[in-house]
Amino acid sequence: MTSSLASELRKRVTQRLPDRLTFADDLARLLTHAKLDDERLIFPDPLYRDDPAGFFRQVLGVEPWERQVEILEAVRDHPRVAIASGHKIGKSACAAGIALWYFASWPDARVVMSSTTARQVDQILWREIRMMRARSGRCLDCKAADPDGLVIPVPCPHSAILDGDQGELARTGLKSRTDFREIVGFTAREAEAVAGISGRNLLYIIDEASGVPDVIFTAIEGNRAGGAKIVLFGNPTRNEGEFFDAFYGKSKLYHTLRVSSEETPNVVNRDVRVPGLATWEWIEEKREEWGIDSPMYAVRIKGEHALAEEGKIFSLHMIELAEQRHAETPEAGRLFLGVDPAGESGTGDEAAFVARRGIRQVAMQTRLGLTPIDHLHHALTMLAALRVPRETPVIVVDREGQIGHDTYLAMRDYQNAHPEAFELVAVRAADKAHRQPHIYDRMRDELAANLEAWFRDGGAILEDTRLERDLHVLQWKYAANGKLKVIAKDLIRKMLGRSPDRYDALALATWEPLSLRDDDDARALGAAAAQMAMAADSAGHPPDAARVFDPYAARDVWRK
């Protein structure tokens, strides 16, 4: 920009601004606008096609950090790009900026963004698009010279306004007013919507790609025949599927990058240079919590696939999906509270309390140093906060050991005096398995299998790093009698450096005794119950038998 008027204006903002702008200030701004009208970029424009980092700096007013620049150039140069990363490296902002760059640089550009959940698409990716577009039109230099935008106009002499009409949700999209350019977003469940988009300049951006089902990639591949680009972002939690194959089975087809959380400017400089990116303190916390050689550290910090997950009961992928769907999973069904008691010494194990309704965990709390009566009082406090009118919640308590036994007795005595307060179920993990004794050895093994089935049925959990680690450390092994067992509790303690209290409480919360399920289902079944009884009779079972399906027992149970 060579305008002497604009040059003079830029000089002025480097000096102290007056407390009150004068008429001359307003006039200068109007004259600058008029002068720049003939020199403004009008999108689509090829100016930044070969310089996406320049687009970030000049149009979006954002300084990409070193690895983000590498990602931008890879997308510019390659038809297929896959980026495996740790947490907090700015991948959502990078994906949103890429979408806007492509939208602004090619005629008839169409950008399709997708992720595993509607929350990820609308509240993360689309929110980044909206914020970036709202803050665009001022280059980095002008933002630095005039942070409050009081003097330098928008767009500044070196930038441009991103055109288009933008909806509140990604499905509505950003659509150009002058041609057919657009950015839209869909969840990974909407394969038909993804498959129905085509165009000569088409870009697919898939976030959380490790969790996106292969049917989406099949739909995308059908549209790639016309030369569409595809960019995959994700935390490498899953060792199968298109995202995994991009790094292993299809490495010749994809340009791949791995970006570690340890590389962010905040970590390298041990100072917050870019708000929102991983910090040195957070990295140190995770090194202490997970261990630098652990699979969780490799996946969630270094952006590396954990290739030795065989035998894990809960893979990192399964855990991450359960966390991602929590926001969209409704609370439906009876309130259950799992209680894993701990001693009152005030050190060591925590007493853990987990509440859930149906397939949604609704609360989790831990406490140290509780007496048996304290356990009861804390459980009652949680129930009072979470129960609905006229509901009788269920407490499932581990009565293993002296503290478990005493806590159970305290709860039983209270229930006897207040039968409407809650139903009480006691579980002793060391007892022999009784639902599927031909498969599992002990109750603790059945509890793990039951929780795994709850996960596969759509169970949704709260994000908690200790719970994640509790779940991920669990593995199956075969006992001498040929039955499945969870690895020994002492080994788990050694691996974690503590007891898996949060896991234990969650497993208890999802343990739904068949007798209670009978009570809950009786009213809802109605005529269906009679049909089930007839089916039992026709199958050769006693005429008075009732068929009860326990979704977490992995079998149908016939009872007289």
Image (cartoon, grey):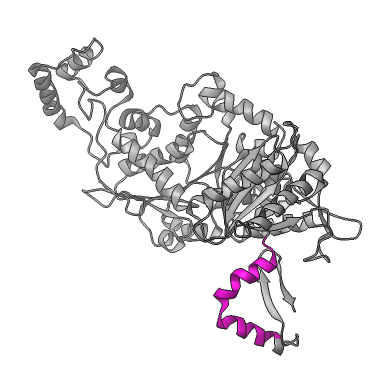
Tell me the residue at 65%/37% (across/down).
367
The residue lying toward the viewer, choosing from 456 and 431, is 431
Task: Name the dominant secondary structure of the magenta segment.
Answer: helix
Q: Is residue 519 magenta?
A: yes
Rendered view: 447 above or below 274: below
Rendered view: 288 above or below 411: above
Q: Which residues are magenta?
A: 512-536
Rendered view: 162 above or below 317: above
Q: Is residue 201 magenta?
A: no
The residue lying toward the viewer, choosing from 404 and 48, is 404
Tell me the residue at 68%/48% (across/down).
339
Residue 163 % position (x, y): 24, 42
Evaluate whether residue 120 shows in this view. Answer: yes
Q: Which quadrant of the structure image shows residue 554?
A: bottom right
- Image position of 260 (left or right of 199): right
Residue 205 % position (x, y): 45, 47
Evaluate whether residue 250 shows in this view. Answer: no
